[in-house]
Image: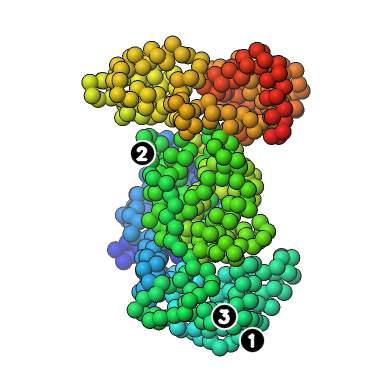
Amino acid sequence: MSVLGPLALHHAGIETKLASPKQRAIFAALLLSSGRKLSTGKLVEALWGDDPPRTASETVRTHVYLLRKALKTTGISLLRTPDRAYALSVDDDVVDLEEFRQCVARAQAERVSGHPKKAASLYDAGLRLWRGEPLAGIPGPFADSRRRSLAESRLAAHSALLRCRMALGAHQEVAADLFELTAENPLDEGLRELLMTCLYRSNRQADALAVFRETRELLREQLGVEPSPGLCLTQQRILDRDETLLWPEENEAAPSAEGPATRPARTGFSPPQPAQLPKAPVVTGRVGTISRLVGAVREGVAVLVLEGMPGVGKTTLALHCAHRLAPGFPDGQLFLDLGGPGSSGPPMSVMEALKRLLISVGVPAAALPAEADERASLFRSLLAGRRYLVLLENARDTEQIRMLLPGAASSVVLVTSRVRATGLVVTHNVRRIMLAEFTSAEARAFLAERLAGRGRPAVRPVLDAIADHCGRLPLALAVVAAQAGDGTERPLAAVARGLDDTHGSLDAFRIGRDAATDLRGAFAGSYEALSGRAAQLFRLFAGFRGIEVTLADVAGRLGMSFVRTDAVVQELKEASLLAEGTPGRYRMHPLLCDYAAELAGRERRSPRDRGRSTGRAERCR
């Protein structure tokens, strides 16, 4: 089965043709969705985007029926799930895209191990699978998006192949290929930097510098920007007749018996292979969310933001998925805590974040650019054509995230944030995944795994009672489970009664002075970042515990207009402190309401504290 060119289906040597373009589009969407089921609505979106015709759903159902008939002789099943969605039953190893990915992964492993000749052979085998433009002739926004993503993957593999050939000394042949590639991708500075290096190694210094001048004029004319720091550094090394530029960089291939036996010390960047992910945590439940996140990465999504309220388990889930995905990113895994709301330290500046990321990928501290945009450009240049997994923990806002994103889709970024990244969906086409509290079944399984046994039977009603007291919030459940399992071996019914006795207080959800297990402290980090009006509304929700309210309810209690009230409500939503269950109706998590009640009580008791709290919130606005 082929998607690396015009769509083609072969079974037992016989080709099955899908006559209708829309049938091909539906088949491609299902095939490239990593086994996920797609609803009729999702297929409508794949074919027409945001502007479907009135009869779109009926048209999709008709084409699905005809597609199912066409696939009967191919060994491929088009299944309809109980919730009226569709999925393909097909083995990955019969799809040329999966074969290409396996070739690239094996090539990257050989490249990292210092075997450029073997790596080049594998890259070449993968690239030979391509038969032209991927998904050629298939209409719709989904196909357009995947075409761009697949083209980037092909270019990254071609670039890596040329680096391996350069490591083997084939500079003149590589230069000819690079001239052709740069003509097809004139604004790709990574390719032009590679071409300059290749020409310099071919004793064509004047031609290499001419490439730099041409690139600078092109960037100024078309984008109004200067060349990237990486390109400028290569130009300066050529002007300085830097001999180390004549030898393969470690990002082309590590030293091996296939390359030179010795080489002089270098002054250029020497990318390490970072493995910075903290220890993989134990995850209970979240099966559907994990499948969505891992599936999105495998289908080519380059940036995913995991959002949710404090204590909902974003970090645990992100780390679990990052460790699961790590083998597919042989160039390394980067981890950075950005110090957003709830962190123990101050927020990390973009300059400091870029400094740490650049040093992690081999840039000497003395070579760091002085400006944030220059550091961001250098970071994008160094990650281009390489496969890194970057986990950015606890982002403060979308602007902080935006500056830390690689430019190429070869690397993947996972972000956790309490602040919603809606703006990045517009500017960078990121995938947002909202994380809610556990379902009843997940909370019960979580508690049973940690509390049952050793003479304490897992009685379902008791587990449900404990889970309800914890609002099914993972951090609260984990704290209670840790306290109940500290060696006292209290019966689970006693654990539930203890929570019932402290109902309305967050004292039960902390372990000593450990900030990482203090639910009140986790909530405080988000509250203290609110504006004065939003902080006032947050405290007001103490009276709305367990119920949904409308904008009219809130406006009446605040004594403000609908417009101003809506702006304040949206601020709480953006901070993941308020959920909109159904359109126009809002709900706050019960434990957040308990925290709001504590704050409201404190406000009533101490007018001086009220002024100080409001002032702090205003300063954070």
Please give the label number shown on residue 282.
Answer: 2
- Decide if residue 361 is on the left or right side of residue 464: right
Q: How is the image coloured?
A: rainbow
In this view, the mark in front (3 or 2)? 3
Determine whether 94 is above or below 430 in the image: below
Please give the label number shown on residue 268.
Answer: none
Rendered residue at 55%/79% (across/down): 197
The amino acid type of the residue labelled 1 equals Ala
Q: Residue furthest left?
A: 455
Task: Provide residue 523's location: percent of width, then percent of height.
Answer: 55, 28
**Lower sequence index among marks 1 and 2:** 1
Rendered residue at 52%/79% (across/down): 244
The residue indicated by pointer 1 is 206
Q: Are marks 3 and 2 in contact (CB under 8 Å)?
A: no
Please give the label number shown on residue 242.
Answer: 3
Rendered residue at 44%/11% (across/down): 501
Task: Provide residue 299's location: percent of width, then percent of height.
Answer: 46, 53
Q: CA distance from mark 3 to mark 2?
A: 50 Å
Image quadrant where residue 125 sits: bottom left
Task: Provide residue 237's location: percent of width, then percent of height.
Answer: 60, 77
Task: Provide residue 418's location: percent of width, then percent of height.
Answer: 56, 37
Determine whether 431 is above or below 477 in the image: below
